[in-house]
Image (cartoon, rainbow, N blue to C red):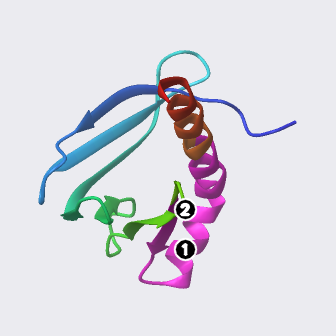
Amino acid sequence: MGPERRSLAICAIDLRPNGAFRWVHRAPDGGEGHSFTGIYREIAPPERLVFTVRMFPSSPEPVGTLIFTEDGKKTKLTMTIECATNKDRDALLQMRIDAGTAQTLENLAKFLSMIA
């Protein structure tokens, strides 16, 4: 059985440098679940998007970087998340950020196939 499919209860995005975002996952009972908030640090269309994510109150914020490159007639996405410590990285993995990110990318691929 694959990862549990989830949708967003809240998705607020101010896509500009120093703009904020807030995503709140829908909990299995239909209410609000885990939330992610952060700030967009760099926006360089169409190549690069850099943002911080507020995850751990007592630690520096992880930095996410999305790099988009042309690969023939397709676009390749390279995503990195940098944490200040191995402990913070391990906490993200324990929260299953890998599964959540994979689900987000699957949702994006499905959406893009519908509009293509």
Decide which of 33, 7 is in the foreground and name it. 7
Badge 1: how crowded within 10 Å, few (<14), some, or many (20+)? some
Q: Is 39 left, or right, of 36 in this rendering?
A: left
Q: Quadrant of residue 90?
A: bottom right
Residue occupying the far bottom of the picture: 85
Residue 9 picture location, percent across and down: 41, 24
Q: Is residue 98 magenta?
A: yes
Tag 2: amino acid: Gly
1 or 2: tag closer to the N-terminus: 2
Distance Cα–Cα, label 1 vs label 2 = 33 Å
For the residue pair 3 and 54, the one nearer the viewer reads as 3
Q: Going by the picture, which residue comes out furthest to the front?
A: 72
What residue is rendered at 48% in x and 84% in y? 85
State how many labels appear: 2
Would residue 21 appear left or right of 78 to someone viewing this image?
Answer: left
Q: Label 2, secondary structure: give it.
A: loop
Whether 84 is among the magenta residues is yes
Position in image of residue 82 (x %, y %): 44, 77
Crowding around mark 2 (Cα neighbors within 10 Å: few <14, some 14 to 19, many 20+) is: few
- Label 1 element class: helix
Residue at left offset 50%, top offset 74%: 88
Residue type, label 1: Arg
Residue 45 vertical placement versus 100 (above, below): below
Magenta range is 76-103
Residue at image mark 1: 89
Q: Quadrant of the N terminus?
A: top right
User: Is 25 displayed left or right of 15 in the figure?
Assistant: right
- Residue at position x 66%, y 50% from top? 99
Dot label at residue 72: 2
Q: Is residue 111 above or below residue 44?
A: above
Looking at the image, which residue is at 32% across and 59% down? 54
Q: Nearer the viewer, mark 1 or mark 2?
A: 2
